[in-house]
Amino acid sequence: RTVQTGEDVAGHYNELDEIYREIWGEHVHHGLWRTGKESVAEATNALSDFVGEQLDLTPDDSIVYIGCGYGATAERLSERKHLHVTGFTLSEEQARIANQRTGALDFHVRDWLANGLPTAAYDAAYAIESTEHIADKPGLFREAARVLRPGARFVVCAWLSEDNPSKRRVRHRRSGSIHRRAGTQGRDQQVRAQRQIRHGSQARLARLGGLLVAQHTLDRYSGRGSDGEAPPVPDEPGD
């Protein structure tokens, strides 16, 4: 398997910028459906809000957003919790849109592994579906541990592999992938995230990077259906 480079990721999101904005809207991430009846906008906002809750933020905190996309989650958290957010993306097109947003926001076109941030200067950090694009996972976590103050939280939402998944999860995963493949005309295959690692491996790498790990699995964290609605997630005995 060819190792994905930062140039690959930047080129993909720059080239398909209009498609992403048309199909995905403000957020370049999936959603959290608590009931299964939410719209895509409600679910994506719900995931952003859930991340904010897990970060345990207080007003005037300075936080870091790794893989900020178009900056929608950064703006939402900044407005609702009165924060300063520093975001990083490899895409100039994403940064162009993000920099049009209002609030205490700074966005940089820069590799997270060479972020240039001071040590122990930030109150929290988060990444939503962006760590999959970073091949050097130990470096990812080392940099997070370096820039965060002691006791600060780093929240990651990521696609991870799982041994022996239930039938419901397999069906849900397939349903959620339809929209992405159709919307980008197969180009996702060229910039597909690095081979998905297992939950345990992610936690081990985070610990090696100097972080304490608390895991939280979202069963209804999911992709979008082909019709733009949340894929069904029926409960089944034994799941």
Image (spheres, rainbow, N blue to C red):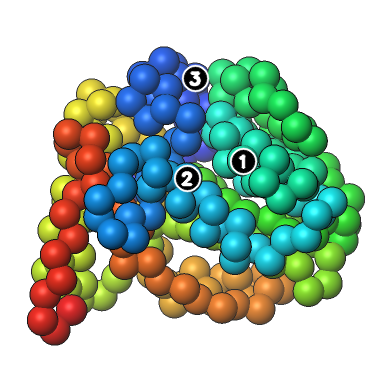
**Residue 149 coordinates in the image, percent (x, y):** 84, 65
Q: Which residue is mark 1?
A: 76
Q: Which residue is mark 3?
A: 14
Q: Which badge, 1 or 2, comes first in the chain's sequence?
A: 2
Whether 195 is drawn above or below 80: the answer is below
Question: Quick one: SS at disc 3?
Answer: helix
The answer to the question of whether label 1 and label 2 lie on touching residues, with beta carbons closer than 8 A, is yes
Q: Residue at x 60, y 20 (%)?
A: 97
Q: Which badge, 3 or 1, comes first in the chain's sequence?
A: 3
The total number of labels drawn is 3
Amino acid identity at mark 3: Asn
Amino acid identity at mark 2: Asn
Question: Quick one: SS at disc 2?
Answer: helix
The residues bearing labels 1 and 2 have C-alpha atoms spaced at a distance of 8 Å
| Left or right: 57 in relation to 61 | left
Q: Which residue is mark 2?
A: 45
- Callout 2: few (<14), some (14-19), or many (20+) C-alpha neighbours within 10 Å? many
Whether 57 is drawn above or below 40: the answer is below
User: Which of these two is toward me, 59 or 47?
Assistant: 59
**Residue 34 coordinates in the image, percent (x, y):** 34, 60
The residues bearing labels 2 and 3 have C-alpha atoms spaced at a distance of 24 Å
Question: Quick one: SS at disc 1?
Answer: helix
Q: Residue at x 17, y 34 (%)?
A: 227
Q: Can I make out residue 128 in this image?
A: no
Residue that protrudes farthest toward the bottom in the picture: 238
The residues bearing labels 3 and 1 have C-alpha atoms spaced at a distance of 23 Å
Location of residue 91 by image quarter: top right
| Left or right: 23 in relation to 49 | left
